[in-house]
């Protein structure tokens, strides 16, 4: 059984509705909903819809680079790694400043590439913290010293999560294939301690994507099984002073590009697989303590209780694509599930930077931000009911909640009751 601390942590991390009702998010959410009501009303009347107000995503996934020094067999972004496209650092900063003016609250540095390989990684972390953003880093652990160097800038609520997916070095090597100098699991875990030493406020996480025989990244690309190392990974995380370990089931990429859960992709029958997963989780949870948590992701929960299909029934409009986006060297995308996929493209890599800067020859050029149009277009044309029908979407409940607020006849102020500040703006 979950401890009350774990339940609280789990509920807070995944309650996106509560996050949107926080005082810091409400102004953007209110403007967004009001605008959506006006757009729908204009559509009914057959008149021109109003332009998007001066808002943007509250939270972004910022992929600093597509470069990676590993070749993980289960990497969902395998085809988009190490491509010859880069951010222009100045344009990227301009885009982020625009987003802050439009309400941005948090940035997660992760993506199809290892963020610490970005040449200006430390400088970017400092820049983001100077803008008073919440910052999180998802890393493969190979450059923990670079994170430790800027750890002092992190504040309460920021976190660093290492994607390790193994309890033994053998499995780590077999799954991740680190390139270059001798990188091993012990060395990664001990260098991670340096981050915590420099700043105990940083929440340090050990991420474990559970894999099993028969799972494939894509057709014919099998994945090494790690399911039996859930407990040994938990013991390792606890021993090295991580604050938590989080378990997620393996996701694969569907033919049309979306990240999807496929419980039938296994060499054993689903019931047997679920039983093994439950056993692994129970063994891991036995090691929870006051200062160490075992977090089973919402994906894992719905995988185990068989309700994962419920999360594939999306409303036609995905509202979250306006409130959380992915900025990557490949472009700006509406959702991590469609990172690098054309139908989810908001715009080019600098779409949130000001277009006027590109056109300095014409000093009178009207200042526009291409991503405003890109977001508007997707809200009109991207039908999540069909485009995301295979995705077990964690944002499904909050999307339905927002849709209800858009279509309700009641004035918004009577429906939008603000919630408490939960100190977590990551979406
Ligand atoms: S419905 Fe879910 S999976 Fe689809 S774009 Fe929106 S958040 Fe992403």
Image (cartoon, helix red, strand yellow):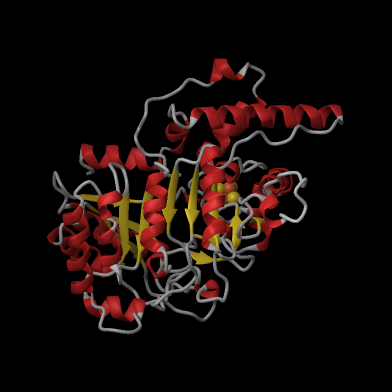
Considering only vertical position in the picture, is 370 above or below 401?
A: below
Q: What count of labels does the image hold?
A: 0
Taking the spot 70% from the left edge, 50% from the top edge, the residue there is: 356
Considering only vertical position in the picture, is 338 above or below 184?
A: above
Between residues 306 and 208, which one lies in front from this camera angle? 208
Considering only vertical position in the picture, is 207 above or below 78?
A: above
Considering only vertical position in the picture, is 307 above or below 343?
A: above
Residue 91 position in % (x across, y down):
57, 57
Quarter of the image for residue 404 reads top right
Between residues 310 and 328, which one lies in front from this camera angle? 328
Residue 326 at least partly seen: yes
Taking the spot 25% from the left edge, 69% from the top edge, the residue there is: 228
Residue 35 position in % (x across, y down):
67, 30
Residue 302 at least partly seen: no
Taking the spot 43% from the left edge, 67% from the top edge, the residue there is: 118
Residue 307 position in % (x across, y down):
46, 47
Taking the spot 61% from the left edge, 53% from the top edge, the residue there is: 388
Looking at the image, residue 101 sits to the left or right of residue 40; the answer is left
Looking at the image, residue 173 sits to the left or right of residue 412; the answer is left
Between residues 195 and 224, which one lies in front from this camera angle? 195
Looking at the image, residue 45 sits to the left or right of residue 425; the answer is right
- The quarter of the rendered structure image containing the N terminus is top left
Residue 143 position in % (x across, y down):
30, 69
């Amino acid at each position: 059984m979950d401890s009350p601390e774990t339940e609280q942590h789990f509920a807070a991390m995944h309650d996106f509705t509560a996050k949107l009702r926080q005082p810091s998010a409400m102004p953007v959410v209110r403007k967004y909903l009001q605008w959506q009501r006006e757009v729908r009303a204009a559509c009914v009347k057959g008149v021109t819809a109003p332009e998007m107000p001066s808002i943007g995503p509250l939270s972004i996934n910022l992929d600093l680079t597509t470069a990676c020094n590993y070749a993980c067999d289960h990497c969902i972004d395998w085809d988009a790694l190490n491509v010859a496209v880069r951010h222009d650092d100045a344009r990227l900063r301009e885009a982020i400043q625009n987003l802050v003016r439009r309400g941005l609250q948090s940035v997660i540095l992760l993506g199809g590439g290892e963020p610490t390989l970005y040449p200006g990684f430390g400088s970017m972390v400092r820049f983001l913290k100077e803008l008073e953003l919440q910052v999180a880093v998802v890393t493969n652990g190979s450059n923990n010293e670079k994170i430790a160097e800027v750890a002092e800038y992190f504040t309460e609520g920021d976190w660093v999560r290492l994607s390790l997916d193994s309890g033994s070095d053998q499995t780590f090597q077999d799954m991740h294939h680190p390139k270059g100098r001798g990188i091993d699991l012990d060395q990664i875990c001990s260098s991670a301690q340096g981050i915590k030493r420099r700043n105990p406020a940083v929440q340090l996480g050990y991420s474990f994507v559970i894999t099993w025989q028969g799972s494939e990244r894509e057709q014919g690309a099998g994945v090494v099984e790690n399911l039996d190392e859930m407990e040994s990974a938990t013991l390792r995380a606890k021993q090295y002073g991580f604050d938590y370990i989080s378990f997620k089931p393996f996701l694969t990429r569907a033919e049309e590009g979306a990240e999807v859960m496929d419980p039938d992709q296994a060499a054993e029958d689903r019931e047997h697989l679920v039983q093994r997963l439950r056993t692994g989780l129970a063994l891991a949870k036995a090691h929870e303590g006051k200062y160490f948590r075992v977090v089973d992701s919402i994906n894992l929960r719905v995988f185990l209780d068989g309700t994962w299909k419920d999360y594939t029934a999306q409303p036609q409009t995905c509202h979250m694509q306006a409130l959380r986006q992915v900025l990557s060297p490949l472009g700006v995308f509406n959702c991590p599930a469609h990172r690098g996929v054309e139908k989810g493209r908001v715009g080019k890599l600098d779409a949130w930077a000001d277009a006027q800067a590109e056109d300095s020859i014409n000093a009178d050029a009207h200042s526009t931000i291409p991503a405003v149009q890109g977001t508007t277009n997707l809200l009109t044309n991207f039908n999540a009911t069909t485009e995301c029908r295979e995705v077990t979407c964690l944002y499904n409940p909050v999307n339905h909640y927002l849709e209800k607020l858009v279509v309700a006849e009641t004035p918004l102020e009577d429906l939008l009751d603000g919630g408490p500040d939960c100190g977590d703006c990551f979406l």
